[in-house]
Image (tube, coloured by chain):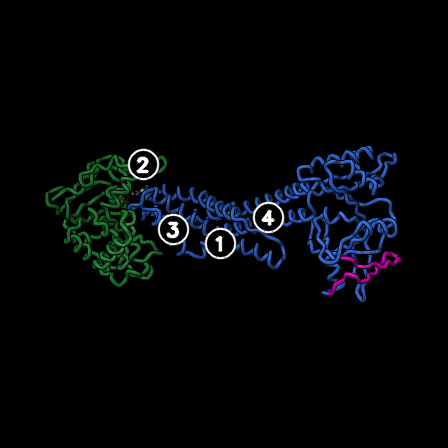
Amino acid sequence: MTKMLEAKGLTKVYHMGAEQVHALRGVSFTVESREYIAIMGPSGSGKSTLLHIVGCLDRPTSGELAIEDRDVRKATDNELAEIRNRKIGFVFQTFNLLPKATALENVELPLIYAGVRRRERRERAAAVLERVGLADRMGHRPSELSGGQRQRVAIARAIVTEPAFILADEPTGSLDTATGAQILDLFAELNSEGNTILLITHDEAVAARAQRVIRLLDGRIVSDTGGSEVRA
Amino acid sequence: MNLGETIRSAVWSLQSSKLRSFLSMLGIIIGVAAVVGIVSIGLGAQTSVLDMVSALGSNLIMISPAPTLGRGGSVSADPRDVFTVQLAQHMQERSPGIKLVVPLVQGSGLLIYGGSNLRSTVVGTTPAYTEVTNYKVRAGRFLHDLDLEHQTQVMVLGSRVAERLFGQANPVGEQITYVVGDRRYSFTVVGVMESKGQVLMGNYDNQVYIPLTLAMERILRTKTVSTLMAQAASAEAASEAVQQAEFLLYSRLGTADGFNVTSQDEMLETMGDVAFTLQLMLGAIGGISLVVGGIGVMNIMLVSVSERTREIGTRKALGAKQRDLLLQFIVEALVLSTSGGAIGLLVGTAVAEGVSRFGGWPTKIQVSALALAFGFSALVGLVAGVYPAMRAARLDPVVALSYE
Ligand SMILES: Nc1ncnc2c1ncn2[C@@H]1O[C@H](COP(=O)(O)OP(=O)(O)O)[C@@H](O)[C@H]1O
Ligand SMILES: [Mg+2]
C-alpha cells in the first residue's frame, strides 16, 4: 500500500485576542491508500481543524504534512488550491452546494477549476451523478432535492476529480438515520471501489462502519485502532 | 479557469437574480442614456446653430451701432447718426478688404392682399443684398438699381409671406397694400425668394424687401440705416475687412465703443464655444450620474460578496485560486456595467431619436460619443468591481465555509 498522507506533530493555535486556543496539540498519523478512517471525538476536540489542515484549506501552526510524499508546508496558496482541486474531495455536513446551480453544474464546478473542457466536464459529471444514483435528477437545483439527494450531489462533486482521498466532515450530521445509513452505504461502496476516505463523526454507529477509528480529545490523538498496524 | 468560462459563469450568475441585476444596472443605464441623449441633442443644436450662421451669407460682416450711455452729464454723440448710406458707399470704396456693403433699414407693418393680411418685417435694401446673403430668387426678380433710383413701389416677398398671402398662386404682378400707422402704400410684387429657413437672427422667409431709398425717404422717413451688411473680398480677407470697417467707424466717431463689427467666422466661433461649453457641462452631469451608477454597482457587488461568502468558501475548497475569484467578481461587475451601458446606449439613442422626431429638435448621434459613454461604463464597472473582488479573493476559506 502507498502512503497517501503523513502528518507529524501537527499543532494549531488560534489567537482570540490575548487568549490562545490550542485546537491541535501535536497530531501524528499516516493514511495508506484505500483506507476508510473515522475520526471521532467530542465537540471542540479539534476534528474539523484537523480535517481542514489535512485538506489544505488551512495551514498548521507547526508540524509536518506530506500528501502523496509531497511536503505541503512550503506550498504557496495557489499550489494549495491546486492540491485541493486535484487530490482532495470535500464533503460537508451542510452540503455547500451552489443554490442556483443544477446538480450537474454543481458537480462540474471542480472540473472547471481543473481546466477540463466543457464537453468532457458534462460527460464526467453526468457519469458520477449516475454512479451516486441521481441519473434522473441532474437538472434539479438543490432546493428541489431531498437532504440525502443533496449529499449525494456533494459526494459526486467530491469524487468527480478522482481525488487521492475524500474528506467528509459529519456527512450524515444533518440527515435522518435512514438517509444517513444510505449515505454511509455509498461511502462503503466508494471505499471498496478503491477510494481513500477520512470521515469525521461523533456517532459510534457511523464510526463502526470504518476500518480504522482515530479518537481525538483536546487536540490530541487518544487512540487509533483498526488500521493495518498497531498505532495507538 | 479561462476567460470565456468566467464570462459565461458571470452571465449565468447575474441571470439567476435578474431583478437585482437589473436594479443595480439602472444607475449605469440612466447614466449612459443621459450622456448619449444629452450629447446628441447638444451636438444637434450646435450643428443647427452653426448652419444658421452659415446660412446668413458668405464672408459676411455685420456692422451695427451700439448706443452707449452718456457719461456723467456730458452728452455723447449718438453713434446711430453716422450709419448712413454715404458711410456704406464710403466703406465699400475705401476698404480693399471689403467687396460690398449693403445698408438695411427695417420696419414692420401690415400686408394686405385680397381678404388676407399678415404682419411682416419690411426690409429696405439694395440689389446687392442677395449676393451678400446668398439669397436666391425663385420667381420674378429682386430689386434693381432703377427701383432705388426712382423709388418705385415694388416689393419682393420672402417664401413664407408669399405662401401665406397667395397660397399656391403666383404673386408676381399682384398688388399688395402695405399699412403702416395710418398710411397706406400700394406695392407691385415683382419677385418671390426661395426658402432659406431659419438663420441666426430671424427668418428671411418671413420678410419682404423694398427699395432702400423708398423705405428711408417715404415710409420710415429716416436718414440713417439700422445695419450694414458687408461682404469681405474673400474668406482670407475677412479679418482685414473687419479692421478696415472698424477703423473707418473709429475715425468717424472718435471712439471704439459705439459700434459692433462681427464677422461670420467670429459668430461661428462664439456659437461653437457656447455650444461646446454647454455640451461639456451636460456631458459632465451625465458622467456624474455614471459615477453614481458605478457606486450602485460597487454596492451590489459588496452585498453579493458577503451574501455568497459560503459559495466563495466552497469554490476555494474545490480548487478555485485567488485570481479565479478575483476574475469572477470583476467580470461580474463588468458584465453588469457593460450590459447596463449597452441598454443605456439603446435608450439614449431612442430618446435622441424621439426628441428629434416628435419634439422637432435637431439631434446628432455621434459614434465617438457612444463609444465614450460605453467605454466609461466599462471603466466604472472595472473600478467598482476591483475592491469587492479583492475582498472575495482574500477570504480565508475556512472562515468563509463556516459563515452563517
Ligand atoms: N477560527 C477559530 N478561531 C478560534 N478558535 C477556533 C476556530 N476554529 C476552531 N476553534 C476552536 O478550536 C477548537 C477545535 O475546534 P473544531 O476543530 O471545530 O472542533 P470539532 O470539529 O471537533 O468540534 C475549539 O475549541 C474551537 O472553539
Ligand atoms: Mg466540527
Decide if residue B301 is on the left or right side of residue A191. Answer: right
Amino acid type assigned to the residue bearing label 4 in the image: Leu
Q: Is mark 4 within 8 Å of ligand 1?
A: no
Q: CA distance from mark 3 to mark 1?
A: 18 Å
- Chain represented in green: A
Q: Quadrant of the C terminus of chain A?
A: top left
**B137 or A127, nearer to the observer:** B137
Q: Residue at x 37, y 54 (%)?
A: B12
Q: Is mark 3 within 8 Å of ligand 1?
A: no
Amino acid type assigned to the residue bearing label 3 in the image: Ala
The crowd level at tag 4 (other Cα within 10 Å; few <14, some 14-19, many 20+) is many
Q: CA distance from mark 4 to mark 3?
A: 37 Å
Q: Which residue is mark 3?
A: B10
Q: Which residue is mark 4?
A: B43
Q: Which residue is mark 1?
A: B343
Secondary structure of the residue carrying tag 2 is strand
Labels 4 and 1 in the same subunit: yes
A30 in relation to B27, above or below = above
Main SS of the magenta part reads: strand
Front disc: 3 or 1: 1
The magenta-colored residue range is B169-191
Front disc: 4 or 1: 4
